[in-house]
Amino acid sequence: MVDYVFERHLSGGIHIPANKDTSTAQPIRRGFIPAKLVLPLRQHRGSPAEAIVQVGDRVLRGELIARAGPPPSAAVHASTSGWVRAIEDRLVLAGDGVQPSQCIVIETDGRDEREPPPAPWPAERAAQLERIRSAGLVGLGGAVFPTAEKLATPVPCKTLIVNGAECEPYISCDDMLMRERAADVVAGALLLTDLLAAPLCIIAIERDKQRAEEAIEEAAKAVNDPRLKLAEVPTIYPAGGERQLVELLTGDEVPGGHYPSEIGYVCQNVGTAFALLKLVRDGEPLLSRIVTVTGAGIREPQNVEALLGTPIAELVELCGGYNEGVLRLIAGGSMMGCALPDDEVPIGKASNCIIAATEAEVRIDPTEWPCIRCGDCAVVCPPRLLPQELLVAAHTADFQALNLFGLQDCIECGCCDVACPSHISLTERFRQAKRSLAMHDRQLKLADESEQRFERRERRIEEQRGRSASLIDRLKGEATDPDAREAAIRAAVERATQRRDRSADPE
Amino acid sequence: MLSAVVILAGLALALTTLLIAAARLVPSGDDGAVEAVERVLPRIQCAQCGYPGCRAYAAALVHDGAEINRCPPGGAHTIAKLAELLGRDELALDASRGSASLQRVARIDEAECIGCNLCARACPVDAIVGIPQAMHAVIASHCTGCELCLAPCPVDCIRMVARRG
């Protein structure tokens, strides 16, 4: 049975149509091998991975092809066997939008030959974390933060929250995973609980995912672990946001600028738990993820277990191709996703959903009306900010005000955009403002440091000038004054004698 | 009538004395003005304005009526702010002052560097390291892109490249 049922206990948030039914109508499609893989070296938050293969190399399924950079970072593996055909810059989807990244392009051979199985799962925690790091595991909920770094918590973990809320419209990959692989998800959740030595593990599922909930319930009953609890959370966007879920389940608010792990809570997505199980049980690094391919522009919307690096075009082809009238291709959900430039962009660790949206699904009229200061945005803002004030500050580039009104606490959920009666694209402004604020802070830091370095240098040059001036004075005095000259000669003779005595008598 | 004249004249005299005394006793606040102007400048000490460092330029702006368009890295943004702060008219940037930009950093070509140390001595923020006769290098995170190291290099082995990150 469900252990906790939560009614509404979330500040802000909105009710929006989920649009998930079409993609959950059929089971997850597995086993597809594309003709080509494009594996970005930067699919995660943090520093890019470093390629260790060369063009022309043959690689096997599960082979390490790029090792993790300085932390936080994650390794990249070949998702199937084939040949490395190119290492080049391409547009990819990283944790924070579409960006150019170096990519390893692999031509697959369809044989899917594997690496020999690795050594058995180690017993010590440090070695386990190292294995997770080298397996390239990252959070699969969308933020793609390296898992090993997230599990190395600064304070002991009170509660592990396994996030199966999946509140964003269109996305159904977690729902389908829980329905079809409930036992594996539960086993993975318990592995995470062991790794964190957490006394409590809560699997949180949104109320509208009854089938997933039943499946998880059954799997949990089968293992019967007292640490494991199941929670049903209200169907409201963004209940599945990390900070929102922690607050919803525990009542504790995560302080701005800090991670939940700093107050004893760790959130992991159900997909991450499943990936960890595959690593521990089968020795398989992160090679695939479940992607929801949906939207009215897709012939057969469904969930696909796609190899990382699969070009979106091949994935769409697998799902029956495009319908007429596709206006925009979106990676991610309809609220936080970003528009893609084309369908050559590959599936990365962050790609939970691909939407081919038609005219009915996207906003086409870009007209914005002035802010009427109605305050609707503040009502729906989950981190309790004042978007209308932030908008003014962003417009005037008033960095002090942006900090004062907590721009950094904006989770970019998009609720204010939906609520705004003037149709102002608030979230996009805030993203831009975050970028210019970061730039401003960097420049200010450089200016302060430069000023200090300049002043230190001036002082040093002044001192050097003073020292050489006094030396010149002394030498001048010795050269002109006979007494001083005598004294200097005597002192030099004295020093020479002492040195001779010392070397003669090495005591 | 007379009493009114006396009272007003006396009042005027007293207040004038008070004002003169206040002007003498209370510090003029020039340093405050210089500091405020300096805050508006990019403070990367590139010296392209012709003054040795941002503070010197700020002082010249306040005291000597230096032109407000001599700061290439600050650009139009800084000119606008200076115009507002000093109550002057906005001017176009004096292009002859140089092309320093925060978006670029210096890079030394390792193969060409002869280790003469002249660039390190020219750097206003100690961003170049290296001992004489050995290869020198620019610490990119400290470099302000002021271009002061370009001219002294006898083998022209320093280039300006885009700043990363």
Image (cartoon, rainbow, N blue to C red):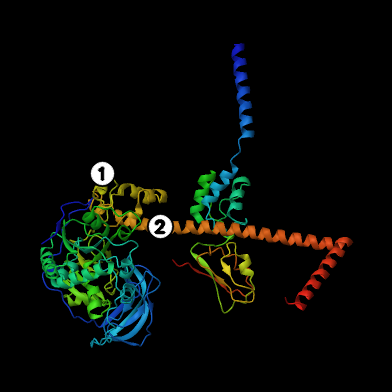
Give the amino acid at mark 1.
Cys
Q: Quadrant of the C terminus of chain A?
A: bottom right
Task: Tell me if residue B106 comes above or below residue A411 in the rendering.
Answer: below
**Callout 1: SS:** loop
Q: Which quadrant would residue A99 be assigned to in this image?
A: bottom left
Q: Earlier in the sequence, mark 1 or mark 2?
A: 1
Left-right relation of B89 to A103: right
- Measured as percent of width and height from the top left, residue A285 is found at 27, 78
Residue furthest to the right in view is A482
- Image point 38% across, 50% down: which residue? A402
Which dot marks residue B43?
none
x, y percent for residue A461: 66, 60
The residue positioned 35% from the left and 62% from the top of the image is A154
For badge 2, the amino acid type reads Ser
Q: Is residue A243 visible?
A: yes
Q: Which residue is mark 2?
A: A436
Label 1, residues with CA under 10 Å away: few <14, some 14-19, many ≥20: few
In the rendered image, the residue lying farthest to the front is: A507
Residue denoted by label 1: A374
Callout 2: 10 Å neighbours few (<14), some, many (20+)? Answer: some
Q: Residue at x 34, y 81 (%)?
A: A65
Whether residue B48 is visible: no
Q: Residue at x 25, y 73 (%)?
A: A276
